[in-house]
Image: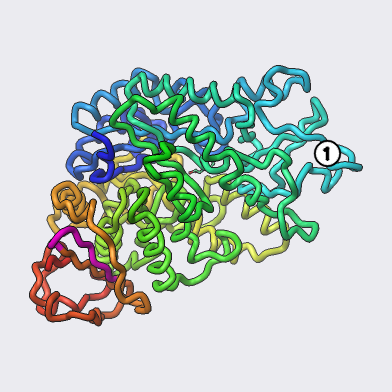
């Protein structure tokens, strides 16, 4: 049973946007349960469920006010138990989202913490007086110069006690203080409670932020302005100690689980430590390097992606975790724009491009994650104005940037390209009015292209993106080289062709992807060898090393 996840594929469900069973326009648990045959047909092994806990929904459920219940919008604990039972009956597992870097400000822990400086739970969060020599509320009186990931300072003044609390995300997401042993024990007890209920693991939200330098120093490079300060909380001093303790307290002695830590800013060397089985911390992490290559200093500064940068980055991760540790593989999730729009072509060549991206990703070494709708080749949404967006990150950035004098059209262009709502438009089940997502009014508009791009059409079409994903998932289950083979990047300097081999014993695969809208020939060292190879994935071609626009292919020597 151990390391079963090396041959597994995970499917992420974003509950607000997957399937609505009661017509309120918001997806829910019974809606997901009713659609499990879609996942079973795809062949995935695990469902990762984004947060369904009670929440004021300031950050779409990543602000949790009760860790041991289900938000009525999504259903009940009984609905969760049913989903779990139906998944297990189909041989699939359930991984829950664990959000314990912060809680909601409406969580009872925070309510108690904020109610007085002498309260027992005061130190469960990060409270600090104003900067020395300044008065609470004065501009710049925040205890540090850290910026919130959702714009503005990372500190909020609480008038009741005259102190500030830390919130790396929204002001309704105060950071928990993991220095407190009581906080850690409360979190571990909650995790055991979910595992005892039958869930199969956790995806851990920004878990490499939980250990902060307790001195909370100012961030570098300030010049008077606010900066992330993240060098003081990304993989902080006690992070490995905390995760090893969590493993001992929660996971030790339990089998068949999956743990994956979401880790912005993690390095390959750190990731190897986190995922070294001998250290017993996590099974795998989500790293961010490859999804930041088309951005400048912030995610809103767009820059063109160079394929050679993408290849260099992913090859470094493959090499770094080749002997010890394990990779997670992803193009998209609920925080990233749609992969086919971002990395390829969501117009004329959409189907071929979505398949090529899938081929390239799934043939890497690591556990692939499919984000809902990616298996249909769903695209970014045609947002007209700022009123079409719902996400706090986008709305706060727009307000801040426009107030600072940026051209609103320019800001909108970056929201359209990078905004998280692109990934959050409702799942496209069929061609009907709201794409079969809801009978009510969807909380975020359905992409009008659902009349063409939808699950019903995809399942009926043997040449669809959906059936391509099915084939890739089946290959991972049945061909050991896909999960266990070694990895060699080829053509590192080619700006159009992504090429690599995988090898296990005397089995060797060649994976090719054309990241351009022109036909291209892969200039490989041993062309004759590959010309004679068997076509494993892709469309037949007279010349096996020639790729059509955005085409991908796998050959077996
Ligand atoms: C990462 C989550 O994926 C994202 O959606 C959320 O806004 C932040 N963490 C804060 O919880």
Q: Which residue occupies the extreme front position in the image?
A: 278
507 lies left or right of 28: left
Q: Residue at x 49, y 61 (%)?
A: 292
User: Does 488 sit above or below residue 88?
Assistant: below
Q: Residue at x 63, y 35 (%)?
A: 175
Q: Residue at x 60, y 63 (%)?
A: 297
Between 427 and 97, which is closer to the camera in this rendering? 97
Judge the density around disc 1: few (<14), some (14-19), many (≥20) Cα neighbours within 10 Å.
many
Residue 535 image point, x, y percent: 11, 67
| Magenta stretch holds residue 37 | no
| Magenta stretch holds residue 501 | yes
Magenta residues, dominant SS class: strand
Q: Which residue occupies the extreme right position in the image?
A: 133
Residue 456 image point, x, y percent: 20, 47
Between 393 and 190, which is closer to the camera in this rendering? 190
Q: Is residue 25 visible?
A: no
Q: Quadrant of the N terminus?
A: top left
Residue 323 image point, x, y percent: 33, 53
User: Does 350 sit above or below residue 226?
Assistant: below
Q: Quadrant of residue 21?
A: top left
* Start-end of magenta stretch: 499-507
Regarding mark 1 in the picture, which secondary structure is present there?
Answer: loop
Q: Which residue is mark 1?
A: 130
* Number of residue marks: 1
């Amino acid at each position: 049973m151990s390391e079963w996840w090396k041959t597994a594929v995970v499917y992420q469900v974003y509950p607000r946007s997957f399937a609505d069973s009661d017509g309120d326009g918001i997806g829910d648990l019974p809606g997901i349960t009713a659609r499990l045959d879609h996942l079973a047909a795809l062949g995935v092994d695990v469902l990762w469920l984004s947060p369904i806990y009670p929440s004021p929904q300031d950050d779409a459920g990543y602000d949790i006010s009760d860790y041991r219940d289900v938000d009525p919008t999504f259903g009940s604990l009984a609905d969760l138990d049913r989903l779990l039972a139906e998944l297990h009956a189909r041989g699939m597992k359930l991984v829950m989202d664990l959000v314990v870097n912060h809680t909601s400000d409406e969580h009872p822990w925070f309510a108690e913490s904020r109610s007085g400086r002498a309260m027992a739970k005061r130190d469960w969060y990060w409270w600090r007086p104003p900067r020395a020599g300044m008065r609470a509320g004065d501009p710049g009186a925040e205890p540090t110069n850290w910026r919130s990931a959702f714009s503005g300072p990372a500190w909020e003044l609480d008038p009741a006690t005259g102190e500030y609390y830390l919130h790396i995300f929204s002001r309704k997401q105060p950071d928990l203080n993991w220095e407190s042993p009581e906080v850690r024990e409360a979190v571990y007890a909650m995790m055991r409670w979910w595992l005892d209920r039958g869930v199969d693991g956790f995806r851990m939200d920004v878990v490499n932020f939980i250990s902060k330098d307790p001195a909370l120093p100012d961030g570098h490079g300030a010049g008077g302005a606010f900066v992330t300060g993240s060098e003081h909380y990304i993989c902080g001093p006690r992070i490995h100690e905390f995760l090893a303790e969590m493993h001992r307290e929660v996971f030790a002695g339990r089998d068949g689980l999956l743990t994956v830590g979401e880790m912005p800013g993690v390095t390959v060397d750190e990731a190897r430590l986190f995922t070294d089985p001998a250290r017993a911390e996590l099974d795998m992490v989500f790293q961010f390097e490859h999804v930041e290559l088309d951005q400048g200093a912030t995610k809103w500064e767009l820059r063109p992606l160079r394929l050679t940068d993408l290849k260099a980055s992913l090859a470094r991760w493959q090499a770094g975790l080749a002997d010890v540790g394990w990779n997670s593989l992803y193009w998209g999730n609920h925080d990233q724009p749609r992969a086919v729009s971002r990395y390829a072509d969501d117009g004329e060549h959409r189907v071929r491009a979505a398949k090529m991206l899938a081929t390239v990703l799934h043939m890497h070494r690591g556990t692939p994650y499919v984000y809902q709708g990616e298996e249909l080749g769903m695209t970014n949404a045609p947002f007209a104005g700022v009123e079409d967006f719902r996400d706090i990150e986008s709305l706060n950035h727009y307000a801040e940037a426009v107030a600072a004098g940026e051209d609103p059209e320019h800001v909108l262009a970056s929201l359209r390209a990078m905004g998280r709502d692109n990934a959050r438009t409702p799942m496209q089940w069929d061609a009907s009015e709201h794409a079969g997502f809801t009978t009510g009014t969807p909380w975020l508009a359905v992409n009008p292209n659902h009349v063409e791009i939808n699950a019903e059409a995809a399942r009926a079409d043997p040449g669809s993106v959906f059936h391509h994903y099915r084939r890739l998932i089946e290959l991972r289950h049945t061909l050991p080289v896909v999960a266990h083979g070694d990895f060699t990047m080829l053509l590192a300097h080619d700006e159009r062709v992504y090429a690599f081999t995988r090898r296990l014993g005397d089995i060797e695969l060649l994976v090719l992807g054309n990241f351009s809208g022109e036909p291209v020939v892969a200039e490989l060292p041993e062309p004759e060898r590959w010309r004679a190879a068997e076509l494993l994935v892709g469309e037949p071609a007279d010349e096996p090393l020639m790729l059509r626009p955005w085409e991908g292919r796998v050959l077996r020597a």
